[in-house]
Image: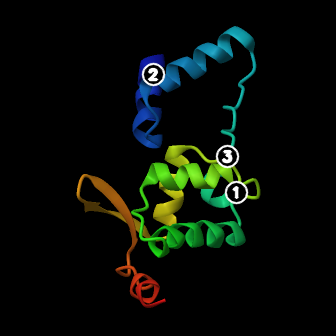
Amino acid sequence: MQYIDLMMSLLTDTGIGLRTIRSTVKEYKETGVLSSPNKKKIRSTVIEKIDDFNKNTIRQKIHGFWFRQEIPTLMKVLAVINEDSELPNLSRSGLYRLLADLNFEFTKRNRNSALTERNDLTFYPRYKTL
C-alpha cells in the first residue's frame, strides 16, 4: 500500500479529516513526538456564579418596580442591581441571560420592553390591592 492509500483508509475508517491526518503525520516527522490538543477551559456562567439568595433578591427588585407602578426595563434593573453593594455587578448581556433563567420575559409596553414573569405576573394584582 502506498502512503496516500493508507491515509485514505484511515480517513474512511475513523472519520478523521485528511488535513488533520496530514498535519499529525507532519508533526510526528518533524518533532518525533505527538502532542495532545490543549483542553478547553471550562468557565462558569453568570447563572452558575450567582446563588439562589441573590437571584431571589434580583427577583424582588423587579417586583419592587411593579409595586411602585414603574415599568421595569432592562437598563433600569441593571442600574438598580449595580448600585446595590450586596449584589455582584453584572453586564447587560449577563443580566439578560440571568433574567431568562429566572423565567422573565420582555413584553412591549408603549415604546419600552417591560419585564414580566412568564406566568403572567402573578404578583402584580396583589401589589395593586396593597
Image disc number at residue 73: none
Q: Residues within 10 Å of mark 3 (few under 14, many from 20)?
A: few
Most foreground residue, 71 or 40: 71
User: Which residue has dot 2 on it?
Assistant: 19
Most foreground residue, 115 or 104: 115
Q: Is residue 6 above or below residue 88?
A: above
Local SS, label 3:
loop
In percent of width and height, residue 115 lies at 40, 64
Q: Amino acid at mark 3?
A: Arg
The answer to whether residue 35 is left or right of residue 78 is right
Most foreground residue, 47 or 78: 78
Q: Amino acid at mark 1?
A: Lys
User: Which residue has dot 1 on it?
Assistant: 49
**Residue placed at 41% from the left, 85% from the top?**
128
Task: State which mark lies toward you, 1 or 2.
Answer: 1
Assess whether mark 3 and mark 2 are in contact (beta carbons under 8 angstroms).
Answer: no
Q: Is residue 40 visible?
A: yes
**Residue placed at 49% from the left, 67% from the top?**
65
Q: Residues within 10 Å of mark 2 (few under 14, many from 20)?
A: few
**Residue placed at 26% from the left, 60% from the top?**
108
Q: Alpha carbon of mark 1 to alpha carbon of mark 2: how far?
A: 40 Å
User: Which residue has dot 3 on it?
Assistant: 43
Local SS, label 2:
helix
**Residue 69: quadrant of the picture:** bottom left
Marked residue nearer the N-terminal end (1 or 2): 2
Local SS, label 1:
helix
In percent of width and height, residue 96 lies at 47, 53
